[in-house]
Amino acid sequence: MNTLQHVLLSMLLVLVVYLTFQNQQLHAALQQGQQASAASVTAALTPLTEKLDAIHAVTSKLGKAADDAAEQKLAALQKRLNLYKTLSVVNQAEQLRAEGKGVPAAEKLATTKKPLWEAGETFADKKARLQGLMNPIDKLVSAWKGGDTNTNVATIRKEIEAVLGELGND
């Protein structure tokens, strides 16, 4: 029985060596297959990645341009709104003048100088007209503070309304 065990153990050892060798060959073949697969996937995905990057760059540029345009439009609308607010203050000053309250009316009208000056800086093509209102405002403020409330803000109001009308058409 000793010989039979020896033969069986030898055969078992040969079988183990054979299976180990086969396992190593299969493992090497599997690694080569995985590397080939990874290389082919990488090769297929590289052009797609480049295209996606290009698409992202274009959409980012378009999105930024759209955002910039929207911000500029919003800023222009805000500047017009500020000019409307200034017109409202001019009208309030006129109302106070009509009620015979010369000093409060003059103070209210004087507050419109800075916004009108800034509007002139903002709307460069209207600068001379808007900043040209400083002298008439100064004259009215002086007259109203001196008690002469006969002169109204019609010329100032008309000029601001004319500028606003032109801005609405821009």
Image (cartoon, helix red, strand yellow):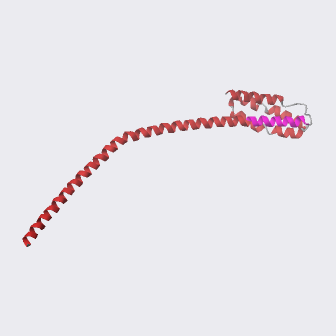
Q: In which quarter of the image is residue 136?
A: top right
* Front residue of this view, candidates 85 and 24: 24
Task: Tell me if 26 is positioned left or right of 50 in this view.
Answer: left
What residue is rendered at 10% in x and 70% in y? Answer: 5
Q: Is residue 116 visible?
A: no
Q: Would you say residue 35 sits in the magenta stretch?
A: no
Magenta-drawn stretch, dominant element (helix, strand or loop)? helix
Quarter of the image where one finds residue 16: bottom left
Is residue 90 covered in magenta?
A: yes
Query: Is residue 92 shown to the viewer in this render?
Result: yes
- Image quadrant where one finds the N terminus: bottom left
Q: Position of residue 99 (x, y in %)?
A: 90, 36
Residue 49: image location, x then y, percent: 40, 41
70 horizontally vs 130: left or right: left
Front residue of 87/146: it is 87
Compared with 19, 143 (above or below) is above
Q: Name the residue located 79 percent from the left edge and 31 percent from the top edge.
A: 133
Q: Where is residue 19 in the image (x, y as percent from the top left)?
A: 18, 59
* Residue depicted at 55% across the width and 38% down the height: 64
159 up-or-down from 11: above or below? above
Q: In this view, does 31 lie to the left or right of 133?
A: left
| Quadrant position of the C terminus in the picture | top right
Which residue is at the front of the view, 126 or 12?
A: 12
> Residue 125's image quarter?
top right
Q: Which percent across, then down, holds residue 85?
A: 76, 37
Q: Give the range drawn in magenta.
A: 83-99
| Residue extending farthest bottom | 2
On the picture, is 152 further left or further right than 14?
right
The mark total stands at 0
Foreground pick, 129 / 105: 105
